[in-house]
Image (spheres, rainbow, N blue to C red):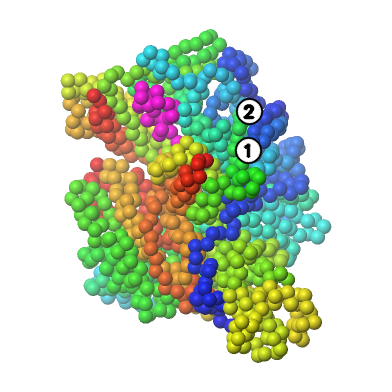
C-alpha cells in the first residue's frame, strides 16, 4: 500500500501556503493540505486519495497554541490533539472539548493528529464537529481575500466537505465559553475502544429554577455531518431534569434522525437506537454536571 | 526409534530437572526485543526487485485481454507477469480434494475479488504499484455466487465449468446407531447456527524473496513459511521443477496461526524472477491484500445440529449438518477444517452415536484458509450450545449435565464414535477446579441478584477437547493422502562439548527452539544457554513438517529425545570401550557424565567423550565413526489408515479445558461485556509453563475476537465490504479479558515427556464459552444468539424482536 | 517524476541526510533507507501500531508520517534502546524478556516505544493508564496479559533504579 506520487511543498509562512493553494487552483492541479496526516495518510497509502500536490503546514510557525482571549479559547489549527489533551487550560475552561479530544482514536493518533485537521477533514463520525455545533465554535480561515470567521453551521457542509474554499487554510478554532453552570456530556458508541463512533451524542444544558434551559443536543456518526436534534431539544426545553423528561427527549432524538448511515457495523434502525440511548445518557450526565 | 523415549521429565538422565517444565526465558527473545530478528521484509539481496500484484475488482469475470505494454515500458519496471506466462510456465495448485485449485494468476476467469491477474517486478514497490495501474485488463463480468445457499440453488451460476457443480464434496458419515438413539431419545434439542468468516491476521503478513536460477533451473525461496518442506514440494509441483531443485529458507514469522498463506505470492515472485532473468524478487503482501485475498478468512458455516438425550440427561446422540463455504477455490486447504472435527467430534462426552452431514461448496468469496483450531472452534460452539439448551430443557445446571456425560478417567484410551482415540484425561477434575476457581455458586448468586435488578447477566460453563499432534489421516475424508507426519532433529556435539540442534522449521511465536534447548540441556546436563538451536533450509534439513495442529512441541521433543538417545548410545559404547571393554550396560548417562553404574565416580564428561571421538581416532573401537551426530525423525506411534467412515487414530493427544465466563449484555445497545473469565486446562506435562500460559491467553484473545468482533462481510454478489483494519476489528488491549487460570496435569501416556499438544488451545473453547454465556443471559427472554460474531447490533435486534430492548 | 526532497533526520542520536521521494513514509525510510529494520510494518493505515517510533519524544505511527515531515526531527526507534557501549538491553526490553511479554515479537518494537513514552511521562502508571497508552498497539499472540505484566515490571525496575 504505497501512495501514488505527489509533489511536496512545505511553505514557511501562511501566506505562502495560501499562495500555493491559489496557484494550483488556477492551474487546475489537485492540491491537498497536510496537517497531522492521521486521516490523510491512510487514504494516500490506500490510493483512495491521489492529490498531485501536498502542501505541508508543518513548517508554518504560529499555528500551534492554546490561549485564552477573554472568555474565548483560541486553538491554533496545527495544535496536536495531544497538546489539547494535556492542556490544563482546556480541561478547566472547555471540558466538553477536552473530553471529546480524549475520545479521538488512540495515543499515537492524538500525538500527531491536529485539532484543525479534524475540523477540515469533516469525518461524519468525528466528535469535534458535534461539539462545534453545540457550542457555536467559530472557525478562522485565511485565504487570498484575507481572514474570515465561519460559524459551525456554515462550516460543515456534507460528507468530508467543509465550506473552505480551495485556497483557504483553516488557521484557528475559537471556542466560546460555556455559560456558567452549563452541564455537558459527550457519549459515543464504538465496538472497540478508540474506534470511529457508530453513533455519538453531545449535549449541553443549563438548569434555571429547576428546569432545563438552553438545551442543545447534537448527534454525530449518523449522517453526512453532525446534526443538531431540535425536536429533542424542544422536548426537554423548560422541563424538569427527570428520567422521564430525558427519556422522552431521547426517544424523539432517535426518531428524528433522518436516513441514518447504513454500513456493516450498524443499520439505520440501530443507529436510531444508539442515538436514543446515548441522548438519554448524555442528558442525565449533563444535568448532573449542571450547577 | 531405538529405545522408548522418556515418558515424563523425571525419566530424563538427570538427578534434578533444571529446564523442562520450568518457566525458562526464551532463547529468541533478546533478538526480538532488539529488533534484529530477520523477518522476511528485513532481507535484502543484491539487485532485488519488488513485486506488486494487480487484482481483479470483480467477483466473477472472464478475462478477455491483458495488455501489459504500458507497464512494461515504464521506467523502473523490469518484468511483468501475465496470465499467458503463467499458463506456459506453471500448473494449478494441488488441492484436497483434487481439482479445485487454480494457477497463481487468473487465466481464463477471475473467481473472486482480489484474485491476482497480473504482477510487476520493479526497482521499488512504489513503482511496481504505479506500473500495475498501467496494465489494462478487459473483463467480461459474469453473474456471481455470493453465499453458500446461493451456490446450491438450481439456477446458480456454475463457477467451475469443468466440475459442472458448485459442490466440492457432499458426504454423510454415520457412526454408531444414530437413527435408533434419536428415535429412542426422551429429548431432542435442535438448533441452527451461522458462523461468519473470521481469520488469523498475524501482525506480520506474508512475504517472500524468490530467486530463479536460470543456469540450473532451480529456485530459492526465502519467506515467512510455516511448513517449509511441504511448501517446497508444493511449489515444485506448481512451478514444474524437480522437488530437490526448490530450496525453501523459512524466516522467523510474525505469527501465523495457520493463516500465513503465500502460495500464489511465492509462485508469482518466482515466475517474475524467472522472467526478470534470474534477479531476486521480493513480494511483501500488504494488509489490504491479506484481508482481501490472503490466507485471512476461515469458517464460513451454516450448521443445523441436534442432540439426543435420555430423561436422566445422558446424551446419546449428536447430529451435525454443515454447509461450508470454501470460497472460490480450495487452494489453501480450508477443506481440512471440515474434516478435523472428526478428531474430537463428540468433545468431552460419552456420546455413543453421531452423524456428520457435510456439504462443501464454492462461491465467489475469497478462498478460505486454515486458522488456529482448524475447524473445531465453530463445531464446539454448536455442541456446547446444544448441551446448554438441553440443560435448560431438563432444568439441570449446565455444569452438572456436562459432568454426568464426561468420559471417565478409567475409560482412557477412549475411542470416540468418529474413530479417534483420546489418550488420557480427567475432565471431572478440571471441571471441579474451574468451578472452585470461579466460586461458581457465588457467581450464580450474583447473577440472581443482577437479574432481579433487571440486568442481563449470563454465566457459561464450557468445555472442549483440544486435539493435538495431528496426522494426515485425520483429513482423509477431504482427500488428503498418507499417514504419519515426520519431524526430525539433528543433534551434534562438537569437539569441545558444545551442542547444536538443527531442525527444519523456523519460529513463529510458540517458542519451540527454547523447548528443544530445554530438552537437550536436561538430557546432557548442559547449560541451556550453551545449546544452539538453528534451522536448516529444506535442502539440508531432516524430514519435517513444522508448526501445525498443535504438534510441534511434542514432535520436536520426540525428535530431540530420539537423537539424544542415539548419541547417548554411541557415547556409552565409546566410554565402555575406553574403560577397558566393560559391557555397555554398565555405563550410564547422568547429569552430563558417562559413568560406571557400579562406581559413579569413574566417568567422563560429554565434552571429554566428544573430544575423544573427534580427536583420538586411535582410541575408537573398531567400526566406530568419529561422528557425534544423530538424527531422529519422530512420528506419532500407532496411526492407521481411516475406514470408509473416516474413522482412524488421528490426533495423538487430547488436551482439554473448561472455561467459566460471566458476561453482561447491555439491554439498550446489545453490547456484551465480559465481566469474569476463568480457565482450567489440562495439556499434560507443560514443557515450558510460561509458553503454555501465553498460548492460552493469546488464544482467548482470538476467541473473543471471533465471538464478538471479527467478521468479513460480503454483499450478495460476493463483493467484500470489510477490507481494512478499520472494519475488521482485531481485539485491542481493551477488549481482551485478563483470565484467571489454573491447571491440571494428566500426562499423556503416549508422548515423549507426557506433553500434549496445546498450541491451538483456548480458541477451541472461548467462542463457545462467550456465546453460551450470552445465551445464558438472554435465556429468560426466550431469545438466543445463533450467529457469530455476537455484535452489539445482532444482539440488540434479538432483544428488539423479543420486546426486551431498553 | 516528483522532485526528491533533501531531508535531515536524527535517528537514535545520529544525523542522517538523504534525498527522498515525498511519498516515502518514515517507516519505509527507516527500514529501507537507513536499514533500521526493527520498526515493523503491519497495516500501513495506523491501526496496528507495529511501526510505532518516537518523533520528538512522542509515540507515532511511522506508516502515517512522511519521511519529509520528519525533517529536522529527532526520531527514536527500537534500535536506540540498547546501551550502545555495553550492549545491555534497556530495562523495558529486559522486562519484556523476563515477563514473557512477547511471542512472535513482530509487534514488540512498537510496544516498547509506546511504553518508553508512557513511562517517561508517568513512572507509576495504573493498569487503566497502561491500557489507555497501549490501546493503539495490537498484539495477536499474547492476549496482552504478559505485556501488561512487562510494563508494570519495567515501571517498577525503572523507579527503583532512578528513572528512564
Q: Position of residue B612 (x, y in %)?
A: 74, 77
Q: Is residue B180 above or below residue B74?
A: below
Q: Is residue B488 magenta?
A: no
Q: Residue shown at 39%/66% (left/top)? A: B743
**Position of the N terminus of chain A by quadrant:** top right
Q: Nearer the viewer, mark 2 or mark 1?
A: 1
Quadrant, the C terminus of chain A: top left
Query: Would residue B431 be seen by someone viewing this image from the given angle?
Result: yes
Query: Which SS class for mark 1?
Result: loop
- Looking at this view, name the residue that lies furthest to the front: B601
* Magenta-tinted stretch: A84-107
Q: Which residue is mark 2?
A: C72
Please say whether residue A86 is one of the residues in the magenta stretch.
yes
Residue, x 68% and y 49% (percent of image)?
A: B43
Query: What is the number of callouts on the image?
Result: 2
Indicate whether B132 appears above or below B282.
above
Neighbour class for label 2 at 10 Å: few (<14), some, many (≥20)? few
Mark 2 secondary-structure assignment: loop
Chief secondary structure of the magenta portion: helix
Q: Residue at x 74, y 53 (%)?
A: B211
Residue A168, which numbered label? none
Q: Is residue A94 left or right of residue A22?
A: left
Residue A222 seen:
no
Residue B585 against residue B568 in the figure, above or below: below
Residue B313 x %, y %: 26, 71
Question: Residue B125: x percent and y percent?
Answer: 67, 41
- The residue beneath circle 1 is C12
**Rendered image quadrant of residue A27:** top right
Query: Is mark 2 in CB contact (under 8 Å) with mark 1?
Result: no
Amino acid at each position: 500500500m504505497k501512495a501514488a506520487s505527489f509533489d511536496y511543498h512545505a511553505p514557511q509562512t501562511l501566506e505562502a501556503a495560501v499562495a500555493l493553494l491559489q496557484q494550483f487552483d488556477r492551474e487546475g492541479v489537485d492540491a491537498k493540505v497536510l496537517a497531522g496526516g492521521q486521516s490523510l495518510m491512510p487514504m494516500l497509502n490506500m490510493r483512495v486519495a491521489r492529490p498531485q500536490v501536498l502542501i505541508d503546514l508543518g513548517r508554518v510557525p504560529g499555528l500551534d497554541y492554546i490561549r485564552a482571549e477573554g472568555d474565548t479559547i483560541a486553538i491554533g489549527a496545527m495544535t496536536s490533539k495531544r497538546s489539547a489533551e494535556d492542556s490544563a487550560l482546556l480541561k478547566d475552561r472547555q471540558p466538553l472539548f477536552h473530553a471529546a479530544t480524549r475520545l479521538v482514536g488512540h495515543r499515537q493518533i492524538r500525538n500527531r493528529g491536529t485539532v484543525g485537521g479534524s475540523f477540515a477533514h469533516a469525518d461524519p463520525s468525528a466528535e469535534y464537529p458535534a461539539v462545534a455545533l453545540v457550542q457555536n465554535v467559530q472557525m478562522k480561515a485565511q485565504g487570498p481575500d484575507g481572514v474570515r470567521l465561519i460559524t459551525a453551521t456554515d462550516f460543515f457542509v456534507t460528507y468530508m466537505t467543509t465550506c473552505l474554499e480551495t485556497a483557504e487554510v483553516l488557521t484557528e478554532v475559537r471556542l466560546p465559553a460555556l455559560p456558567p453552570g452549563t452541564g455537558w456530556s459527550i457519549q459515543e458508541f464504538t465496538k472497540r475502544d478508540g474506534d470511529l463512533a457508530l453513533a455519538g451524542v453531545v449535549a449541553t444544558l443549563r438548569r434555571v429554577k429547576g428546569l432545563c434551559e438552553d438545551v442543545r443536543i447534537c448527534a454525530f456518526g449518523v449522517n453526512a455531518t453532525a446534526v443538531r436534534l431540535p425536536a429533542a431539544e424542544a422536548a426537554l426545553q423548560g422541563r424538569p431534569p427527570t428520567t422521564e423528561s430525558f427519556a422522552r427527549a431521547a426517544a424523539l432524538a432517535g426518531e428524528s434522525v433522518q436516513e441514518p448511515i447504513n454500513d456493516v457495523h450498524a443499520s439505520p434502525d440501530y443507529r436510531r437506537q444508539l442515538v436514543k440511548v446515548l441522548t438519554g445518557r448524555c442528558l442525565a450526565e449533563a444535568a448532573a454536571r449542571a450547577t | 526409534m531405538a529405545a522408548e523415549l522418556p515418558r515424563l521429565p523425571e525419566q530424563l538422565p538427570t538427578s534434578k530437572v533444571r529446564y523442562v517444565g520450568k518457566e525458562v526465558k526464551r532463547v529468541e527473545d533478546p533478538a526480538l526485543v532488539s529488533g534484529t530478528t530477520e523477518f522476511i521484509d528485513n532481507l535484502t539481496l543484491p539487485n532485488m526487485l519488488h513485486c506488486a500484484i494487480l487484482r481483479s475488482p470483480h467477483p466473477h469475470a472472464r478475462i478477455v485481454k491483458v495488455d501489459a505494454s504500458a507497464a512494461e515500458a515504464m521506467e523502473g519496471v523490469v518484468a511483468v507477469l501475465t496470465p499467458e506466462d503463467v499458463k506456459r510456465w506453471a500448473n494449478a495448485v494441488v488441492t484436497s480434494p483434487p481439482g479445485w485449485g487454480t494457477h497463481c494468476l487468473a487465466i481464463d476467469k477471475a473467481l473472486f475479488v482480489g484474485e491476482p491477474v497480473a504482477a510487476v517486478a520493479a526497482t521499488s514497490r512504489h513503482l511496481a504499484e504505479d506500473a500495475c495501474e498501467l496494465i489494462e485488463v478487459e473483463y467480461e463480468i459474469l453473474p456471481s455466487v455470493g453465499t453458500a445457499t446461493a451456490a446450491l440453488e438450481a439456477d446458480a451460476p456454475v463457477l467451475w465449468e469443468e466440475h459442472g457443480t458448485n459442490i466440492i464434496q457432499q458426504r454423510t458419515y454415520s457412526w454408531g446407531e444414530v437413527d435408533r438413539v434419536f428415535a429412542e431419545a426422551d429429548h431432542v434439542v435442535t438448533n441452527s447456527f451461522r458462523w461468519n468468516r473470521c481469520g488469523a491476521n498475524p501482525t506480520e503478513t506474508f512475504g517472500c524473496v524468490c530467486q530463479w536460477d536460470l543456469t540450473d533451473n532451480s529456485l530459492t525461496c526465502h519467506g515467512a513459511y510455516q511448513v517449509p518442506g511441504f511448501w517446497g514440494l508444493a511449489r515444485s509441483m506448481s512451478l514444474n521443477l524437480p522437488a530437490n531443485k526448490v530450496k525453501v529458507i523459512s524466516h522467523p514469522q510474525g505469527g501465523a496461526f495457520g493463516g500465513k498463506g503465500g502460495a500464489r505470492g511465492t509462485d508469482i515472485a518466482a515466475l517474475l524472477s524467472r522472467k526478470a532473468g534470474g534477479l531476486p524478487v521480493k513480494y511483501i503482501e500488504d494488509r489490504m491484500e491479506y484481508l482481501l485475498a490472503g490466507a485471512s478468512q476461515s469458517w464460513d458455516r451454516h450448521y443445523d445440529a441436534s442432540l439426543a438425550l435420555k430423561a436422566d440427561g445422558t446424551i446419546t446422540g449428536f447430529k451435525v449438518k454443515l454447509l461450508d463455504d470454501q470460497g472460490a477455490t480450495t487452494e489453501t486447504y480450508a477443506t481440512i477444517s471440515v474434516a478435523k472435527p472428526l478428531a474430537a467430534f463428540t468433545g468431552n462426552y460419552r456420546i455413543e452415536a453421531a452423524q456428520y452431514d457435510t456439504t462443501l461448496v464454492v462461491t465467489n468469496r475469497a478462498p478460505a484458509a486454515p486458522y488456529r483450531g482448524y475447524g473445531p472452534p465453530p463445531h464446539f460452539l454448536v455442541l456446547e450450545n446444544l448441551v446448554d439448551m438441553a440443560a435448560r430443557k431438563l432444568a439441570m445446571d449446565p455444569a452438572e449435565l456436562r459432568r454426568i456425560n464426561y468420559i471417565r478417567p478409567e475409560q482412557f484410551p477412549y475411542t470416540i464414535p468418529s474413530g479417534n482415540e483420546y489418550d488420557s484425561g480427567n475432565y471431572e477434575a478440571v471441571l471441579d477446579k474451574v468451578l472452585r476457581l470461579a466460586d461458581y455458586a457465588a457467581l450464580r448468586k450474583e447473577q440472581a441478584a443482577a437479574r432481579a435488578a433487571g440486568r442481563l447477566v449470563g454465566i457459561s460453563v464450557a468445555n472442549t477437547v483440544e486435539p493435538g499432534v495431528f496426522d494426515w489421516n485425520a483429513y482423509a475424508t477431504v482427500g488428503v493422502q498418507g499417514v504419519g507426519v515426520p519431524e526430525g532433529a539433528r543433534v551434534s556435539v562438537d569437539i569441545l562439548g558444545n551442542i547444536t540442534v538443527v531442525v527444519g522449521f523456523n519460529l513463529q511465536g510458540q517458542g519451540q527452539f527454547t523447548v528443544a534447548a530445554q530438552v537437550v540441556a536436561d538430557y546432557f546436563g548442559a547449560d541451556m544457554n550453551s545449546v544452539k538451536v538453528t534451522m536448516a533450509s529444506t535442502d539440508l534439513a531432516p524430514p519435517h513438517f513444522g508448526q501445525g495442529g498443535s504438534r510441534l512441541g511434542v514432535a520436536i521433543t520426540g525428535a530431540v529425545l530420539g537423537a539424544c538417545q542415539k548419541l547417548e548410545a554411541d557415547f556409552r559404547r565409546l566410554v565402555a570401550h575406553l574403560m577397558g571393554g566393560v559391557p555397555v550396560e554398565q555405563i550410564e548417562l547422568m547429569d552430563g557424565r558417562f559413568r560406571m553404574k557400579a562406581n559413579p565416580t569413574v566417568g567422563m564428561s560429554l565434552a571429554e567423550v566428544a573430544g575423544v571421538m573427534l580427536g583420538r581416532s586411535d582410541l575408537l573401537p573398531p567400526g566406530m565413526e568419529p561422528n557425534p551426530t544423530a538424527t531422529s525423525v519422530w512420528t506419532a506411534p500407532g496411526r492407521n489408515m481411516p475406514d470408509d467412515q473416516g474413522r482412524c487414530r488421528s490426533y495423538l493427544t487430547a488436551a482439554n479445558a473448561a472455561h467459566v465466563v460471566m458476561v453482561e449484555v447491555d439491554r439498550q445497545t446489545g453490547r456484551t461485556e465480559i465481566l469474569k473469565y476463568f480457565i482450567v486446562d489440562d495439556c499434560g506435562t507443560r514443557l515450558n509453563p510460561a509458553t503454555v500460559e501465553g498460548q492460552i491467553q493469546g488464544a482467548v484473545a482470538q476467541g473473543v475476537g471471533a465471538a464478538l468482533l471479527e467478521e468479513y462481510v460480503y454483499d450478495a454478489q460476493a463483493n467484500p465490504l470489510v477490507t481494512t483494519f478499520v472494519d475488521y476489528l482485531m481485539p485491542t488491549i481493551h477488549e481482551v479479558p485478563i483470565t484467571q487460570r489454573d491447571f491440571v496435569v494428566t500426562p499423556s501416556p503416549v508422548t515423549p515427556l507426557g506433553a500434549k499438544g496445546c498450541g491451538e488451545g483456548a480458541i477451541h473453547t472461548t467462542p463457545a464459552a462467550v456465546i453460551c454465556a450470552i445465551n445464558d443471559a438472554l435465556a429468560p427472554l426466550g431469545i438466543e444468539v445463533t450467529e457469530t460474531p455476537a455484535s452489539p447490533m445482532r444482539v440488540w435486534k434479538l432483544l428488539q424482536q423479543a420486546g426486551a430492548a431498553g | 517524476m516528483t522532485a526528491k526532497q533533501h531531508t535531515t533526520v536524527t535517528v537514535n542520536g545520529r544525523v542522517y541526510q538523504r534525498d527522498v521521494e515525498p511519498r516515502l513514509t518514515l517507516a519505509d525510510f527507516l527500514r529501507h533507507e537507513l536499514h533500521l529494520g526493527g520498526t515493523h510494518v503491519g497495516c500501513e493505515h495506523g491501526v496496528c501500531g507495529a511501526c510505532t517510533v518516537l518523533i520528538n519524544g512522542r509515540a507515532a505511527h511511522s506508516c502515517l508520517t512522511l519521511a519529509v515531515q520528519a525533517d529536522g526531527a529527532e526520531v527514536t526507534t527500537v534500535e536506540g534502546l540498547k546501551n550502545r557501549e555495553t550492549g545491555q538491553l534497556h530495562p523495558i526490553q529486559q522486562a519484556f524478556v523476563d515477563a514473557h511479554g512477547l511471542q512472535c515479537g513482530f509487534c514488540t518494537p512498537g510496544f516498547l516505544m509506546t511504553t518508553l513514552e508512557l513511562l517517561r511521562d508517568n513512572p507509576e502508571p495504573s493498569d487503566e493508564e497502561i491500557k489507555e497508552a497501549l490501546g493503539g498497539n495490537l498484539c495477536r499472540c499474547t492476549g496482552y496479559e504478559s505485556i501488561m505484566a512487562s510494563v508494570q515490571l519495567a515501571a517498577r525496575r525503572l523507579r527503583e533504579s532512578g528513572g528512564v
